[in-house]
Image: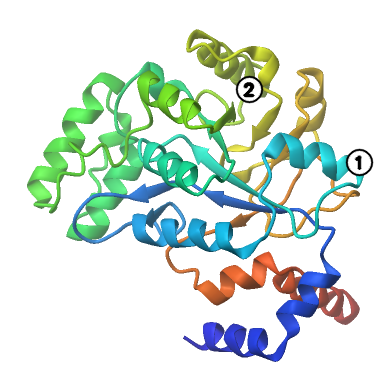
């Protein structure tokens, strides 16, 4: 792969090491979603990562000597200007059932992490219908039934299973809960393993942010998570606007993460923190390009060149 070869050559040249020094005060935030635990072909490049690849990433982080901080500690120290050099945070979006395996791996390597949990599916156990249907379609080549998402909610899962059976998709993706979110017991399990639980809206949308935050916090409160601890937020699908900041601040939210790639410095808005979305197609060299800050420097240079040309 040409890009990977370029990154590998740049790393060998010493530019990654120089970039790491130049960006030493920047906060790195990694973003994950879930793990692919179903036999057969994987799905969702930046959505479900192979278990072995995720474990290799965490092992690399643990052995790198790079300081991995909790989100809360990192945000506090970012504002105070006391971050250790190359500080890194691990975040996980949504709360997929496979988050339990992620929490076990993170605990094994003693790495702190935060999971942003969307809670509607905790109250209404079912696979995420649209994602599962897209998976079936991608494997089988058959189109998603046009009426699937227009059916009443209580009929969609049965229709999804009929679609999967008719498409003869390999692997027990439903029995393995590949596209389910965590149950209350599983959420308690990841918390017991040391994973921090934070807000991600109730229905995974931003249509009515005040209600979404309230419903999200109330659902987590019913599971024993104190409202006073819910001070960090992740925008669903990274969708954010400056108009959202007032709503978040009114509810005592201290940080919010986006899907914008980059590093975070003292002047980065705390309610628009940047992250790096890791995934199956991300090579070790590309992962290192982000962690060392080389990618941020290169992106900044391209933006300046584009503005000059404009």
Q: Residue at x 47, y 23 (%)?
A: 119
Label 1: element kind? helix
Question: On the image, which quarter does residue 9 sit in?
Answer: bottom right
The tag on residue 80 is 1
Instruction: Say above or below: 265 vs 209.
Output: below
Label 2: element kind? loop
Q: Residue at x 72, y 60 (%)?
A: 262
Foreground residue among 90 and 296: 90
> Which residue carries the number 2 mark?
208
**Residue 70 appears at what percent x and percent y?**
67, 39
Position of residue 77 in the picture relative to residue 117 (left or right)? right
Circles 2 and 1 in contact, beta carbons < 8 Å: no
Question: On the image, which quarter does residue 292 sit in?
Answer: bottom right
Foreground residue among 286 and 132: 286
Position of residue 212 in the picture relative to residue 22 (left or right)? left
Q: Residue at x 85, y 58 (%)?
A: 25
């Amino acid at each position: 792969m040409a890009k990977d070869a370029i990154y590998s050559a740049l790393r060998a040249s010493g530019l990654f090491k120089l970039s790491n020094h130049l960006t030493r005060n920047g906060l790195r935030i990694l973003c994950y979603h879930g793990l692919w635990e179903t036999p057969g072909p994987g799905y969702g490049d930046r959505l479900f990562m192979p278990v072995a690849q995720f474990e290799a990433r965490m092992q690399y982080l643990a052995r790198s000597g790079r300081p991995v901080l909790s989100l809360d500690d990192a945000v506090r120290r970012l504002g105070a200007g006391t971050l250790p050099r190359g500080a890194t945070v691990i975040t996980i979006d949504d709360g997929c059932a496979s988050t339990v395996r992620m929490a076990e791996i993170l605990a094994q390597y003693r790495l702190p992490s935060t999971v942003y949990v969307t809670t509607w599916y905790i109250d209404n156990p079912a696979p995420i219908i649209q994602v599962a249907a897209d998976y079936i379609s991608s494997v089988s080549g058959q189109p998603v039934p046009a009426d699937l998402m227009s059916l009443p909610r209580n009929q969609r899962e049965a229709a999804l299973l009929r679609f999967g059976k008719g498409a003869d998709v390999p692997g027990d993706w439903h029995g393995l809960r590949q596209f389910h979110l965590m149950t209350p017991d599983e959420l308690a399990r990841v918390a017991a393993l040391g994973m921090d639980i934070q807000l991600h809206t109730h229905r995974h949308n931003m249509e009515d942010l005040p209600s979404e935050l309230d419903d999200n916090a109330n659902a987590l409160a019913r599971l024993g998570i104190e409202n006073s601890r819910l001070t960090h937020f992740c925008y669903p699908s990274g969708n954010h606007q400056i108009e959202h900041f007032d709503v978040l601040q009114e509810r005592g939210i201290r940080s919010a993460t986006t899907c914008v790639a980059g590093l975070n410095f003292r002047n980065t808005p705390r309610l628009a923190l940047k992250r790096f979305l890791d995934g199956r197609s991300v090579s070790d060299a590309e992962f290192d390009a982000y962690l060392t800050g080389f990618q941020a420097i290169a992106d900044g240079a391209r933006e300046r060149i584009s503005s000059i040309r404009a």
